[in-house]
Image (spheres, grey):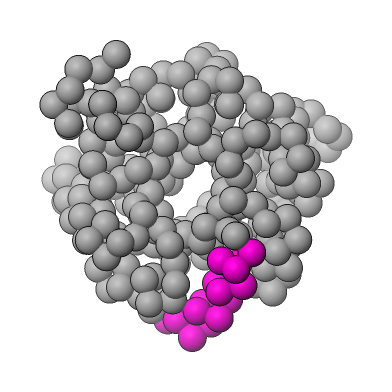
Amino acid sequence: MSEKLRLGVNIDHVATIRNARGGGLPDPVRAAKLAASAGADGIVCHLREDRRHISDDDLSRLMAEIDLPLNLEMAATDEMREIALRHAPPGICLVPEKRQELTTEGGLDVIAAKAHLAPYIEPLKSAGCLVSLFVDPDAAQLDASLAVGATAVELHTGTYCDATAGEVQASELTRIQNAARYAASLGLEVRAGHGLSFDDVAPIAAIQQVVELNIGHFLIGEAIFSGLDSAIRRMRALMDRARAEALGEKSA
């Protein structure tokens, strides 16, 4: 099999559960270590402006204690860039952020934010961070992502995952497939994520231009029933099988 499809495990919602009661448990850093042993290729966390998920201390501990690459999701604000430059994680993913939302709603409007994003991204890249943008599967947004200096894009799969009608989901899958091909043709590294579960991950994993899937909420929820190790290993197996079948290879 060719280059393995990477799995980034987002541990935000371990911190969400901790924060609901206060104190130090459950520990998101412990979850990150468990994810590493279960087959994750990277750890993802979102330091929100309101700190509803991970905290600044969590970020410091993740940088110090985790051997896997860390991908820090954040809004494109001055505060977050200062934090990112202080820690210089291997990856930065710029995402839209609204205080009222329960979770990220749609991709970043790179076209509208081009004047802000180009000078914002340059110091992050100079610090050695790979900068990706979380965007909808839209060609114009991909063109804008390249123009502002992004190295990678993460295609928003939420609309695909949330679709209840088969024809709507099929249409959204086609959008993602087309966007992945186009982004790769531009020289952008292609990632995907948001809302993926055991039931819908395979068609996304089969898209050969996608090199990484980032999954969090579903895995943390599934861990309540089967354990985090089991949930991650099953997701890893589903991803690997779908990619192998797409490449006409036998999965292990």
Q: Can residue 125 be seen at all in this image of the molecule?
A: yes
In the image, farthest residue toward the bottom: 115
The residue sitting at 28% across, 40% down in the picture is: 204
Using the image as rendered, state which of residue 148 and residue 74 is in the foreground.
148
Residue 90, percent from left and from top = 59, 51
For residue 107, above or below residue 111: above
Using the image as rendered, state which of residue 153 and residue 227 is in the foreground.
153
Using the image as rendered, state which of residue 237 and residue 21 is in the foreground.
237
In the image, farthest residue toward the right: 23
For residue 88, above or below residue 249: below
Image-quadrant location for residue 154: bottom left
Q: Does 173 sit left or right of 30 as displayed?
A: left
Residue 182, percent from left and from top = 22, 61
Residue stretch rendered in magenta on the structure: 112-127
Image-quadrant location for residue 84: bottom right
Residue 139, percent from left and from top = 25, 68
Residue 139 is a magenta residue: no
